Image (tube, rainbow, N blue to C red):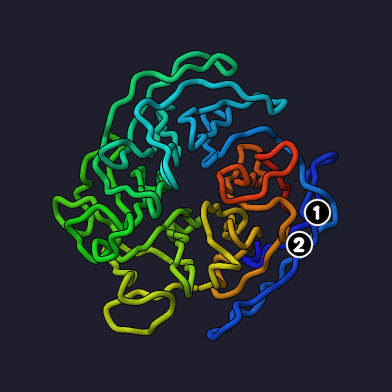
Amino acid sequence: MSARVRFGTLLAAGVATLLVGCTVAPPAAPEVPPATVGASPNAPEVIATGLAAPWSIAFRDGTPLVSERNSGNILELDSSGASRVIGTVTGVVAAGEGGLLGLAVDGQRRVYAYSTAADGNRVQRFDVTGAPGSLALGPAETLLDRIPAAGTHNGGRIAFGPDGMLYVTTGDAGQRANAQDRSSLSGKILRMTPDGGIPADNPAPESLVYSYGHRNPQGLAWAADGTMFAAEFGQNTWDELNIITPGANYGWPTVEGIAGRDGFTDPVQQWRPADASPSGMAILAGTVFVANLRGQVLRAVPVNEPGTASTYFGGDFGRLRDAVVAPDGKLWLLTNNTDGRGAPRPNDDRIVGVALGSQ
């Protein structure tokens, strides 16, 4: 399959596909040429509506789970898109950008959650009982806590890599120098075992730090060949798409965006924050799909040509917080208009599903 994935062809009757998007490039050098990505004029499928400040989607045995940032609730969705609360993460302090953020599910069907508490951000694990339609969240087991937290820059994305390890993005929590301090947990991508331990092959002995020099990373995804991508909020100049390598320094706060300086790893692509503010991301059919908040677009980046990009849905759904691959192979997009920074529309927030085709 070509890495220049084309949107369009319906995978099955009744499955909606992408709206025509516009192809763009960043406004300053280095320019990013557009990818050759096409689109069908058909509308995406609405999966669920009426969500309150949702942040993350994960799947447990095919059942969608959604975190709500402010309430601390974890929801399950049924086949009609109706939601019910399976449990509330206790001790969540929802202030500013903090609250209940990322979700992940391991091979034993346990649910992991990243949330803000009174003493900092934390990663917790929960057993889940019951069948779909009657799932219930068990007691919390805290794997890691006291990650520096603030009203902004909390990171919060968690995901299992192809190596079976749990990866955790943390923001600088407003203390920029901590991103360069490898003894601090903030401004990092962390890597841990499913039980919260330090993997023996981490870059530094006895350290969870996998990469550092990050400002506020909120997207993680792996290509089929194991290449790890991360999306990151910049400050005033550049947001970033990075390829993550163990032990690498991504520059913040010394550099922002592509700098070409020794000792720092440059992003493979950068965007003006007003056009991007990238959050959740997924890789499907050889393309990195990045949900953007301020930019209100879905950005598509071919894995094999990570310096190129196309955008879709410009403003159609407002702010986009997460992008995930559903069990049926569709791409699900999570809107984020009810979080206090968006302009809610009727039935917001919502999940929309998009079927992809290749040519």
Q: Is residue 17 depicted above or below 215 in this figure?
A: above
Relative to 184, 115 lies left or right: right
As measured in the structure, the alpha-carbon distance from the residue carrying label 1 to the one carrying label 2 is 8 Å
Q: Is residue 283 depicted above or below 301 in this figure?
A: above
Q: Nearer the viewer, residue 9 or 295?
A: 295
Q: Is residue 266 visible?
A: yes
Relative to 189, 345 lies left or right: right
Q: Nearer the viewer, residue 37 or 226?
A: 37
Q: Are marks 1 and 2 in contact (CB under 8 Å)?
A: yes
User: Which mark's residue is nearer the viewer, 1 or 2?
Assistant: 1
Q: Is residue 50 depicted above or below 160 in this figure?
A: above
Which three-letter amino acid code belongs to the residue tagged 1?
A: Thr
Q: Secondary structure at mark 2?
A: loop
User: Which mark, residue 215?
Assistant: none
Label 2 sits on residue: 359
Q: Is residue 310 depicted above or below 65 in this figure?
A: below
Q: Secondary structure at mark 1?
A: loop
Relative to 36, 250 lies left or right: left
Q: Nearer the viewer, residue 35 or 180?
A: 180
Give the residue at x 60% y 46%: 336
Which three-letter amino acid code belongs to the residue tagged 2?
A: Gln
Give the residue at x 68% y 39%: 348
- Quarter of the figure that contains the C terminus: bottom right
- Say few, some or many: other residues with alpha carbon within 10 Å of mark 2 (under 14 / 14 to 19 / 20 or more): few
Give the residue at x 39% y 55%: 153
Residue 102, how many percent across, how many down? 44, 41
Q: Could you tell which of marks 1 and 2 lies nearer the N-terminus?
A: 1
Q: Nearer the viewer, residue 129 or 108?
A: 129
Give the residue at x 59% y 45%: 325
Label 1 sits on residue: 9
Residue 247, how many percent across, how many down? 26, 64
Which quadrant of the structure image shows residue 315?
bottom right
